[in-house]
Amino acid sequence: MERHHFSLLQHETEKLQIDIETMRTELSHEIDKVTTVVRAELANHNVETITHTSTLDRVLRAELVNQNTETITTTNKLDRDIHAVRAQLEAAKYDVIKYCMGTIVSILALSFAAIRMLM
């Protein structure tokens, strides 16, 4: 009887070991499937991230080009305005010198006329 009981226990143990090995194999297979799915999703996410990043780079570069164009346009306009103001300043300076010379010549002419009358 004891042998029979021992034999049953041994048979049950072997059956459990086979079940454990079957479960281990199934679990390993499921882990492999999940790992494959996760890697695929991660690869897709990386592609989306790279696509989003390259789109963002293009947008930023376009914005920088626009800002650079605006800066150049503004700089050119300021240069033209500065040149125009300098030209006006030179013209005004020339006019002041012209009127000062005219005033001095007029004063000298009146002075000579007054001296001549007094003499």
Image (tube, rainbow, N blue to C red):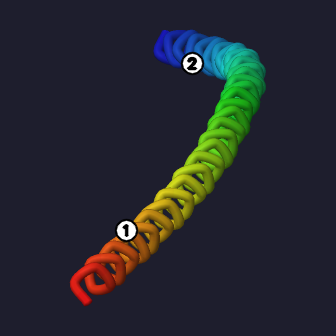
Which residue was labeled with disc 2?
A: 13
Q: Quadrant of residue 31?
A: top right
Q: Which residue is at the front of the view, 64 or 26? A: 64
Q: Residue at x 40, y 76 (%)?
A: 109
Q: Is any atom of residue 23 visible in this view?
A: yes
Q: Is any atom of residue 39 visible in this view?
A: no
Give the quadrant of the C terminus. bottom left
Amino acid type for the residue under numbered disc 2: Thr
Q: Which residue is at the front of the view, 51 or 31? A: 51
Neighbours of disc 1 within 10 Å: few (<14), some (14-19), many (20+): few
Amino acid type for the residue under numbered disc 1: Thr
Which residue was labeled with disc 1?
A: 103
Q: Quadrant of residue 112?
A: bottom left
Q: Position of residue 82 (x, y in %)?
A: 55, 54
User: N-terminal of the two: label 1 or label 2?
Assistant: 2
Q: Residue at x 43, y 76 (%)?
A: 105
Q: Position of residue 69 (x, y in %)?
A: 71, 39
Seen as rendered, the residue at the extreme left is: 118
Q: Position of residue 39 (x, y in %)?
A: 73, 26
Indicate whether 71 appears above or below 35. below
Q: Which residue is at the front of the view, 102 or 57? A: 102
Seen as rendered, the residue at the extreme bottom is: 119
